[in-house]
Image (cartoon, coloured by chain):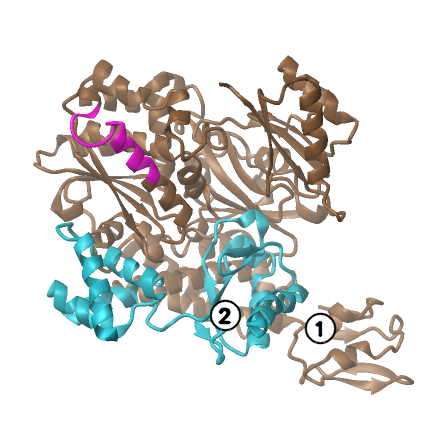
Chain colours: A brown, B cyan
Amino acid sequence: MDKKIVFIKDTGISLPERTKDVYAAFLNGLRDRGMQDSVMAVRVADIGAYSQGVVIKVLPDTTYYNVKDADINRIIDSIKEGKAVQDLATRKEAKQLRIVLRNCGVVDPDNIDDYLARDGYQSIKKVLFELKTQEKVIDEIKKSGLRGRGGAGYPTWMKWNFAKQMAADQKYVICNGDEGDPGAYMDRSVLEGDPYSVVEGMMIAGFSIGATKGYFYIRAEYPLAVDRIQNAIDRCYERGLLGNNILGSSFNFDLEIRLGAGAFVCGEETALIASIEGRRGTPHPRPPYPSVKGLWGSPTVINNVETLANVPYIILKGGDVFARVGTATSKGTKVFALTGKIKNSGLVEVPMGTTIREIVFDIGGGIFNNKAIKAIQTGGPSGGVIPKDFLDTPVDYENLQKLGSIMGSGGMIVMDEDDCMVDIARFYQRFCFEESCGKCSPCRIGTAQMLNTLSKIAEGLGELSDLDNLRRISQAMQKAALCGLGQTAPNPVVSTLRYYQDEYEVHIINKKCPSKKCRNLLSYKIIPEKCKKCSVCMMNCEAKAITGNKDDGYTIDMNKCVRCGKCFEVCKFKAVSKE
Amino acid sequence: MREEKLSVDIENIVKKWEGKKGSLIMILHDIQNLYGYVPRATSLQLSNYLEVPLARIYEVITFYHFFKLEPPGKHLIQVCMGTACYLKGASDLLHELRDILGVREGTTTKDGLFRLEVVRCLGCCGLAPVVKVDSKVYSKVTKDRVADILSEYEQEAAVK
């Protein structure tokens, strides 16, 4: 029953790939010991580590890097004994704790029996036959200290309690699976890897507030997640876990999927409701909050995927067990999508209170190409950058907020010395500008004006007064915008200005980009001492900005140069300088 | 003939969602799955069936990025512009694709072979930068690989 699962992947850069050979050797080793039925070896396409040679991951928590052929048999022996080979295992995952991702990669997401075998639907049973009342369930969630994982961190039990107290014929539960932050894919992984837990979380939420109907709102860009959830819903109906009189109780609950259609603003709850109702996804002012007047005017609770995935665990293990993990104000774990200039990118789940340094260096393996870390960005377009000076900050809702960022849904993007903060601010501002729904003017006009100003600075046309303008527009948007998107859209600008004003000033006063990222501020020059007069740069210059001959050498005319960087790339002698 | 076929398709889709509240977006998804885009004629018929003004339907179609009003190319190229891909040089890839194909994002090449699009995030940031052609994901793409990737599909078209 309890089959050990082992992932294998050659992450080295040498070709040909050796995954197949290692896999074959591993299978042989298993067969020699008669273990082929108790251990399942899987060749995976991505194991979350890169350039680390052959990587073997023994689920749940042991990973071996740079595995040599001779080590394979030792690893197999260790699986038999049920412990790790100490001198080989890098205990990189020790800092991780899997609560949300407890079933991801362990259960077959299409097989309900697999989930049932791992305590699946025991929580809803406990709710229906042991706790029995809405108050007791909400009380358990209150004890756990669970806060919304979608960004704002509102206590889940309070949301549920508001909706519970409303007297209404019909109430709704919505699962917000409109994960739109660029660089974040936690919700996708949970929906695809452990759909049954989220379904169970929805059922418990439904019971607690007295709703009989729930909707999954999932991005149309995640077709696999949609398929898996649909399959999970269908299987649950077959087994009497959804529909009327669930498990013979008097509890009725129906679930249905609605697809998003590529609008970032629909992650905002009032816009999301409009979208489920089949309308344009524009937000409306709160109050009334959805827990009072939501979907089709009925009290509605909207929870994020990760929040819901926590719920069955809390009910089964007890709120106080959950609350033992984390910090004083933030309980449990948080899943981060660790990406950017990092060696091991991928999903990590850590207890609240883990420091950024531990996440980036101990788990993520440090910076790609051994460059220096500059900052990390959390919270996507609604968040901010956190400079390297604050790497030792324990991650929780309050700490990140104090630093001018937010927890957000869990994107964590690592930036190195080559990344320009003006460019980053512009990237996020363009995102917000394009995604602004246009309903309220602070956001519609504010994002456009900020984007213009940032572009001006990046192109070398900035003035010092632009910085004040950026600050003033930011303030106006934070105070006056209608919804979360507009109120938080200035965050990347505000936080880069807070920590990296000098970088903005260099762009404005010296007309230079220290990270050599802003194209218009670059200038190229040929260094005569290094130049071998091979003429390759001239031949590759499509703007015909390079002139000269084999005797006198070559020069670049910056008036003609379009700054494509081709000469810099093709010069084998590093004789082209870029500043 | 075409009109008749169209109306049968639409009728099936509308029936599937009959009696369910707020189903317009789901109906539009089904239509786009069928045709690859939402043809104007279909919207007109939908407006008749549902007794909803055409403007209300267009209001929804044009609000959401996902819905398209013109037919897609034979192959859809999606360049991921999520943060991770952006940091790892996705805009260079986009420039290269624009140069080679001679089109801007959101448009289709003259021969109808490729449609170039920019997407927010494909959710595989560990493989950045990523370019997706139809359902195939190309990971850790470099500028000099772009032409090779395109030629796979050009050759395939030439053979046929």
Q: Residue at x 40, y 57 (%)?
A: A490
Q: Chain of mark 1?
A: A
Residue A401 can be seen, yes or no: no
Percent of width and height locating residue B101: 55, 76
The residue beneath circle 2 is A455
Q: Are marks 1 and 2 on the same chain?
A: yes
For numbered disc 1, what is the local secondary structure? helix
Percent of width and height locating residue A563: 66, 75
Instruction: Report, in whole angstroms, how far the alpha carbon at label 1 lies from the one at label 2.
Output: 23 Å
The three-letter amino acid code for the residue at tag 1 is Lys
Q: Split into 4 quadrants, where in the image is the C terminus of chain A?
A: bottom right
The three-letter amino acid code for the residue at tag 2 is Ser
Q: Is residue B152 above or below residue A297?
A: below
Q: Is residue A254 above or below residue B103?
A: above
Q: Residue at x 29, y 65 (%)?
A: B63
Q: Which of label 1 and label 2 is nearer to you? A: 1
Q: Nearer the viewer, residue A355 or B136?
A: B136
**Horizontal side, residue A290 vs residue A348: left or right:** left
Q: Is residue A260 above or below residue A110?
A: below
Res. B140 image quadrant: bottom right
Percent of width and height locating residue A306: 38, 36
A232 inside magenta stretch? yes
Q: Residue at x 92, y 85 (%)?
A: A551
Q: Dot 2 surroundings within 10 Å: few (below 14), some, or many (20 or more)?
A: many
A539 inside magenta stretch? no
Q: Chain of mark 2?
A: A
> Which numbered tag is attached to residue A367?
none
Q: How many marks?
A: 2
Write the start and end of the magenta stretch as one range.
A231-246
Q: Is residue B81 above or below residue A152?
A: below
The residue beneath circle 1 is A566
